[in-house]
Image (cartoon, rainbow, N blue to C red):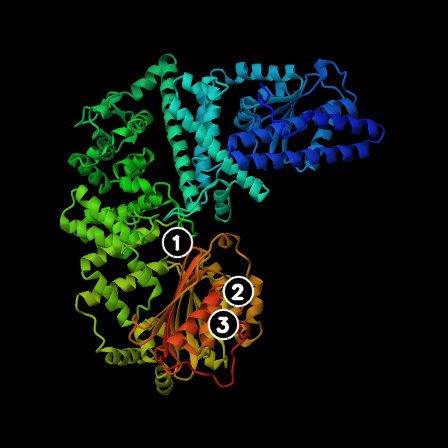
Amino acid sequence: MARHETSFPEILDVAALRARCDFIASAHAEQREPMRRALLAAFKEANIAGRAKARELLAADGAGIKCAERISWLQDQLITLLHDFVLNQVFDAAKAPETSRIAVTAVGGYGRGTLAPGSDIDLLFLLPAKKAVWAEPAIEFMLYILWDLGFKVGHATRTIEDCIRLSRADMTIRTAILECRYVCGSVALASELETRFDHEIVRNTGPEFIAAKLAERDERHRKAGDTRYLVEPNVKEGKGGLRDLHTLFWISKYFYRVKDSADLVKLGVLSRQEYKLFQKAEDFLWAVRCHMHFLTGKAEERLSFDIQREIAEALGYHDHPGLSAVERFMKHYFLVAKDVGDLTRIFCSALEDQQAKDAPGISGVISRFRNRVRKIPGTLDFVDDGGRIALASPDVFKRDPVNLLRMFHIADINGLEFHPAALKQVTRSLSLITPHLRENEEANRLFLSILTSRRNPELILRRMNEAAVLGRFIPEFGKIVSMMQFNMYHHYTVDEHLLRAVDVLSRIERGLEEEAHPLTAMLMPAIEDREALYVAVLLHDIAKGRPEDHSVAGAKVARKLCPRFRLSPKQTETVVWLVEEHLTMSMVAQTRDLNDRKTIVDFAERVQSLERLKMLLILTVCDIRAVGPGVWNGWKGQLLRTLYYETELLLSGGFSELSRKERAKHAADMLEEALADWPKEERQTYVRLHYQPYLLTVALDEQVRHAAFIREADAAGRTLATMVRTHDFHAITEITVLSPDHPRLLTVIAGACAAAGANIVGAQIHTTSDGRALDTILVNREFSVAEDETRRAASIGKLIEDVLSGRKKLPDVIASRTRSKKRSRAFTVTPEVTISNALSNKFTVIEVEGLDRTGLLSEVTAVLSDLSLDIASAHITTFGEKVIDTFYVTDLVGSKITSENRQMNIAARLKAVLAGEVDEARERMPSGIIAPTPVPRASHGSKATKAET
């Protein structure tokens, strides 16, 4: 149970601090409290100075493990000096017999001789069988000093007998004592615990301990998010993090009875190169963790967006073309996490072999019988070892490098898992994947078969990626392995996103997503070329991280790879087009007015065929679904379905504007017929309230519901009224508002929703012929139970009414909700404003892009209103921290904005708002809008807003 072998005098002058402790003891010999205060001050000063020096050295040498060892050594010295002071000066136990002395030992991570700046200090105080009267009071005195120094101390006070008894029953205690390290006090006591623990607990219980630790690891991964590619990883507990390395260390120490991980090379468990990888991974993860703790001043284990940039700078990363410093740092992090996964797999393979050899007597025979090796039909190179594909001989890959692909293909068609030893050999054979193999016809045929498998292609591709085969076979894919994008929209690294997109496509094809995606599920069986679609889904983001637009660059990569995969020229053109246009449908659906004919015409001109339209829709769904949890919702699905159906109609020759007037008249007749039980005069008066766009875009059952709502409000004499309804499938809640019209109505409603914490995902805004507004606001659902969601919606509606009536002031309610978002502060989005008269025949289209914040939609619409612009429709889309708002506007007489000077003024005012600068328009934001004589908006009569926040 060795102490630290290395000392770090640059961190602490131990002799000087000991002399100061002796002086404090003599100066305050008869005064306990002044002595305690002086001791505390001396230790606090030494601790602060020592940790500051450790931080300075970390910045200088970048050595993570060394930093953790320095802090652990500093802690050892403080505890040793404190122990000696308390026993000698406070309790006068200096001459106590050895048999009555206590031992102070470090356990947990501290027991390994490493300590992060903000970590807990785990101590085990060992008592002799016959304890002295001063033992427990002395331990208590030490603990209070440590707590007063600001340390988080985890502690236990036990006899050796207690330790042995508890270790048998509790695996956590067993692991802690496995790492037990002597700090100070009785050496004999600590040594006795080590000897008895080894003989009575460790011996012959290796398999039990291994099973428990691996199960614990799997549960930890599940809680942390079972992928090492989350863009805000947990450095300590996450997959591929420090705890995974610690698990290997624990198992090594327990099963192989080694004290140093370097001994694993001597035992043949790891090669020398793999051990170097182990050391590099551990050092890097420790460096990251120590920087995180120093930077945040606490035990921060999640590498969140708001600290990633500063950690990257501290570690010396710089911007490169196409990749920022923080993205390069995070790519390195994920590659290290992948290395940890590789080491775990290699280690588990050796462990399994060793356990199989060690299995005793009849149980070993039974185990070997159950897991006996079987032949696999059609191959002599691979065998079935208990449901896992294994190598028939060690030279399988060397003899025929195509087997590096064939193994994965055979595993797929036979539904086999992978033997760790086989994957270990794959990792050690990667140099066989040469340019010659990449051009091999059979290798490419096997790869395409794996990618387009009707079973579970994502699982096999994931295993290929984890073994580094995918990135070696397709070097362009290798460039985006472990690459993250520094934004709040993407939850995963680029390679993880692409694999998840393939999984969504496979699930749609297998009929597993009919409920979530009814249209794509219906279209998929009719797709003429599924191979091209699968290749496009895998390649759509393959050019991320390059200086040029990744869609354009990706199309060039696809043009190069498709012939290699033996796709025909026609298939190649399809894949190239899909990759280049993979963002188009999503952006049009979310940021354009789908009721504007030019939107559909322009989109149809880009798509050109129904087959392309179907494939692009499916690719778009797969792309959005694979971004991360919560990004896809029913409202996005509705927008994409609308765009699909409108474009399908145009491409098949059925779209016509000529019948618009006739269709509106027919819709009015249908509404009048639906209100047949109303008095005739009242019925006709109500139907005349609505303009053409309302009659053509609102479903008849909705029109009838609105009619009853307005009738009820009029009967009650209510100027303001709200009505709520929730939709399960679309994950949307409707709040319908009836109010006198006003140019800033959208501003006020959006502000009230922001103040209520409601995320607006869409709205339909209509004006009636008598000067009222009938607006339906769509917000994201927060509760799964309809009754709870309805209550929440009613409270939002009440707040909207309060603001509109003037009972509450909009700036006040927004201010009460606005909190500076720590996560958003980590990002910068340059404000952009684009003004175009080419995107619509009737409207000027203003697109703004900037950093999202509470109440932004309200502020932007206030400025547009202040600039005398009439908003016909608004489309608000949020991608993580970035918002893209598109507004279809005219001037107050219904004309486009053609003056260049006016356009420049609009752009300047909007950029000021996006940048958060003080703007006079926002200073004049109204608190309410009830007016005796309502001012109707321009004669568009009906407006539609579609948003995504």
Judging depth in this view, the residue of 148 and 665 nearest the camera is 148
Asked whether residue 706 is in view, the answer is no
Q: Give me the disc on residue 755.
A: 2
| Alpha carbon separation for disc pair 2 and 1 | 22 Å
Please report the residue visible at 33 percent of the width from the left and 69 percent of the height from the top.
Answer: 593
Give the amino acid type for the residue marked by disc 3 in the picture: Val
* Dot placed on the residue nearer the N-terminal end, 3 or 1: 1
Question: What residue did someone put label 3 on?
Answer: 748
Amino acid carrying label 2: it is: Ala
Q: Is residue 57 left or right of residue 351?
A: right
Residue 631: assigned label: 1
C-alpha span from label 3 to label 2: 10 Å
Where's the C terminus, which quadrant?
Answer: bottom left
Q: Earlier in the sequence, mark 2 or mark 1?
A: 1
* Secondary structure category for the residue under label 2: helix
Residues at marks 3 and 2 touching, judged by CB atoms closer than 8 Å:
no
